[in-house]
Amino acid sequence: MATPLVYGFEFRRTCQQSLSESQRGHWVQEIAGQRVLVTGAGGFIGSHVMTTLMQSGAVPIGLVRSLSPVQQDNGFEWVAADLVTDPLDDLLAGLRPNTIIHCAGRTAAPDTDAGREALFAANLTATARLMSAVSRMGHPVRLVIVSSAAIWAPMPPGLVAIDETHPMRPVAAYGVSKAAATLHALAEGDRLDLDLAVAVPFNVIGPGQPRRLVPQAFIEQLRARPAALALSNAAAVRDWIDVRDVATALVALSQPKGPRGLFNIASGNGVSLQDMALALCQIGGWPPVLREDATHGDSGVSRSIGDARRLTAATGWTPQITLEASLRDMITSAP
């Protein structure tokens, strides 16, 4: 059967395997039984990493700024700490993790001096303090830092996809803060000879995505007023990658004495915001009535597509969940 075309882009089939059995068996065996601290474990990516670690036989420990009653009763081990202000040496000494997956950070803040300071504190300062504390631990620790595709310079015409040699030239404060954290992590990792990898996810989607982000924001609008869905920058192309594939990639990178350096996490496929919205309409049964909304202006990035071949070569990972499946799961899991 031919792969279906939906409003101009091709869906990949869900039957594609993310890892061969031998490849999956290798890193699952390496991580099984390991104590893995996940910062930002209550967030969108971190919560999925916790689940994937448990399924892989690891012992996940969730670090959040404050514990909720739900977290205290869900069977995981949790600890509350602020990576920007709290002492970390005694905390890490008590937890004795074999691996740390650093998902914590801030994705948005007001466009003010205070807002930008908050972004740099959450993304750069927290990363720097965590790495410094790790360097003083009495046993080797594998460290995986989660960055963002917002670090990369806009794609020039003719470039098919962004690989890890692409220049860093972010266009907004969030990207600047993540680029600063990424450069610090790579430089300090080399200087201190840390067992470190930096993962660079592209546009992460899937169940549990915050409501302010696309496509969850589109789903909320379609549920409320389908005929009123308005798009700004409808032609902008993004590389959409499911959060469960991202979690699998991060766990694959977390094996002790694993590959070092930068690793994109991406599908390699570009889909416009308009085609994304039309696909949602088709899957959800909403009328495909879209309006242009110019009130938000241009994001400065017309295309963002990632090349994850370096990650695949190092771990065997490839994305398993299709865009169609991810969108369908988001629609069915939405309240």
Image (cartoon, rainbow, N blue to C red):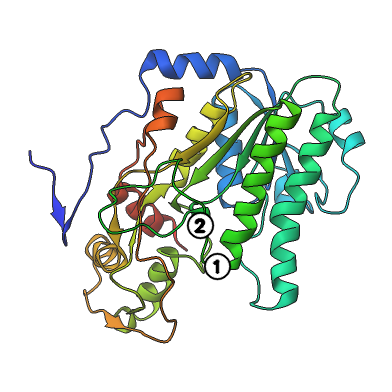
In what quadrant of the picture does the N terminus appear? top left
The amino acid type, in three-letter code, at marker 2 is: Ala
The quadrant holding residue 112 is: bottom right
* 183 relative position to 131: left or right: left
The amino acid type, in three-letter code, at marker 1 is: Ala
Q: Is residue 76 among the parts visible in the rendering? A: no
Q: Is residue 3 among the parts visible in the rendering? A: yes
Which residue occupies 84% across, 33% down?
Answer: 92
**Which sits in the foreground, 30 or 149?**
149
Distance CA(mark 2)–CA(mark 1)? 8 Å
The quadrant holding residue 310 is: top left
* 171 relative position to 132: left or right: left
* 289 relative position to 18: left or right: left
- Which label sits on residue 210? none
The quadrant holding residue 307 is: top left
**x, y (%) of residue 5?**
13, 53
**x, y (%) of residue 223?**
37, 73
- Is the C-beta separation of discs 2 and 1 under 8 Å? yes
Q: Which residue is mark 2?
A: 150
Q: Secondary structure at mark 1?
A: loop
Density class for disc 1 (Cα within 10 Å; few <14, some 14-19, many ≥20) is few
**Which sits in the foreground, 163 or 280?**
163
Seen in the picture, residue 67 relative to 298 is either above or below; the reply is above
Q: Earlier in the sequence, mark 2 or mark 1?
A: 2
**Which sits in the foreground, 8 or 195?**
195
Q: Which residue is mark 1?
A: 172
